Amino acid sequence: MSTSPGAATCAGCSTPLHGWAGPCRNCGHVPTATPAPSSVSPAAPPNAGMPPHAQPMVHVVNAKSPGVAVLLSFIWLGAGHLYVGNIGLGIGLMVFDFFLVLVSLIPLSWILTVPVWLISFVFIAIHVSNAAKAFNARNGIVVR
């Protein structure tokens, strides 16, 4: 005997009740009061289908300090850009700095390479500091 999945059955003998509100006609069991099924289904909760302990994934990033970025750029041009996530520019500046170091190994060439490095560092320090601030703003981080 098949019943429709939405049909109520007697808790005592599993006989379909078909809208019968009184005691079961078969066994006499009196059903307890249950809320009537509503034709409007409630809205699904925001994490429906997820285990109750699971939370939506959140991407967490650490704030980037402009001071640390400038210090890293002072140690090796381009390292500050790698720190703030500008990988391409960081690698390019590291190659440029490596070239300056190689050229400075030639006798008396440091007279040219040191001023070029200092001028480059000033512009790079300003740029990497702004890049760190932009990274923080882009990720909604407020640094005081």
Image: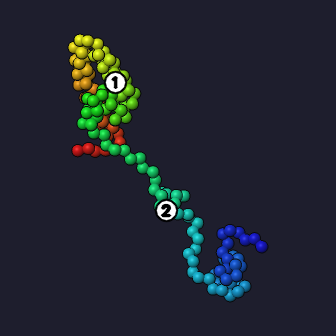
Q: x%, y% of residue 52?
A: 49, 62
Looking at the rendered structure, the secondary structure element under dot 1 is helix
Q: Quadrant of the C terminus?
A: top left
Q: x%, y% of residue 84?
A: 34, 35
Q: x%, y% of residue 28?
A: 68, 88
Instruction: Mark 1 or mark 2: name the one nearer the start of the chain.
Output: 2
> Is residue 137 at all visible to an observer of this figure?
no
Tell me which corner region of the image, top left, top right, bottom left or bottom right, holds residue 14. bottom right
Crowd band around label 2 with a 10 angstrom C-alpha radius: few (<14), some (14–19), many (20+): few
- Marker disc for residue 82: none
Q: Which residue is mark 2?
A: 52
| Residue 118 vs residue 48, the one in the foreground | 118
Q: Is residue 30 above or below residue 1?
A: below
Q: Which residue is mark 1?
A: 93
Outermost residue to the right: 1
Q: Amino acid at mark 2?
A: Pro
Q: Residue at x 59, y 82 (%)?
A: 32
82 relative position to 56: left or right: left
Crowd band around label 1 with a 10 angstrom C-alpha radius: few (<14), some (14–19), many (20+): many
Q: Amino acid at mark 1?
A: Leu
Tell me which corner region of the image, top left, top right, bottom left or bottom right, holds residue 23. bottom right
Distance between the alpha carbons at the discs numbered 1 and 2: 49 Å
